[in-house]
């Protein structure tokens, strides 16, 4: 885990400097405002995301999420983070997102015995940039290939539901 954190810190420090010649080089901080999860499941999924360009058409995003059960009396919550590669194949804002790693930690008295869980995700969305603001609606598919079905079932049991398909609506601001 320490190695993974060290690699992430190096990426955050070095990679934005590699694309300094690119005029579109930027770092965005965003908040997920797409709170449709309580309508579809019994959990609230909060997310904050940092996104930065690494090359034309490629971005890294680093979302940090917090899942809270809303119904029943579950005494557990989860905190997760991921490193996603967002690929913009065209000159417009359409992008495909692929997780390079996705880790979720469940804590509380109702947490499963395996508290640290690994997942994967894919996404499809569109980026709208207005001066310094970013608006990014997207659909996220968690565990699209079914490799982590046991993990998803554990998360659903511990949290009273866990979304595997999400609509997220990131609203962000360009910091640099």
Image (cartoon, grey):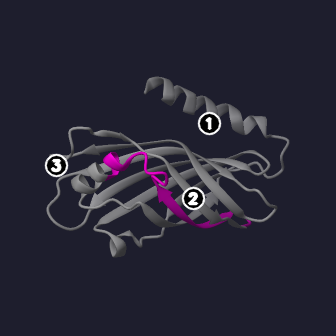
As helix, strand or loop, the secondary structure at mark 2 comes to strand
Of tags 1 and 3, which is closer to the observer? 3
Q: CA distance from mark 1 to mark 3?
A: 35 Å
Residues shaded magenta:
130-152
Callout 2: 10 Å neighbours few (<14), some, many (20+)? many
In which quadrant of the rendered image does the N terminus lie? Answer: top left
Instruction: Indicate whether residue 138 is drawn in magenta.
Output: yes
Residue matched to label 2: 123
Earlier in the chain: of badge 2 and badge 1, it is: 1
Name the residue located 29 percent from the left edge and 59 percent from the top edge.
68
**In-image side of 103 versus 90 (left or right):** left
What label sits on residue 110 in the rendered view?
Answer: 3
Q: Earlier in the sequence, mark 2 or mark 3?
A: 3
- Choose the circle earlier in sequence order: 1 or 3: 1
Q: Magenta span has 43?
A: no
Q: Does dot 3 land on a helix, a strand or a loop?
A: loop
Mark seen at residue 12: 1
Residue 74, placed above or below residue 130:
above
Q: Decide if residue 168 is on the left or right side of residue 124.
A: left
């Amino acid at each position: 885990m320490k190695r993974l954190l060290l690699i992430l810190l190096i990426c955050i420090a070095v990679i934005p400097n590699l694309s300094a010649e690119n005029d579109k080089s930027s770092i965005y901080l965003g908040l997920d405002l797409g709170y449709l999860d309580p309508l579809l499941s019994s959990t609230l999924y909060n997310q904050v995301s940092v996104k930065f360009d690494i090359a034309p058409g490629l971005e890294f995003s680093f979302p940090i999420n917090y899942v809270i059960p809303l119904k029943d009396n579950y005494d557990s919550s989860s905190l997760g983070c991921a490193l996603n590669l967002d690929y913009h194949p065209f000159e417009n804002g359409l992008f495909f997102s692929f997780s390079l790693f996705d880790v979720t930690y469940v804590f509380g008295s109702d947490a499963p015995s395996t508290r640290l869980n690994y997942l994967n995700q894919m996404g499809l969305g569109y980026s709208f940039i207005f001066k310094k603001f970013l608006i990014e609606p997207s659909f996220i598919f968690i565990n699209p290939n079914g490799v982590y079905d046991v993990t998803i079932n554990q998360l659903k049991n511990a949290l009273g539901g866990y979304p595997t398909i999400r609509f997220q609506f990131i609203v962000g601001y360009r910091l640099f």
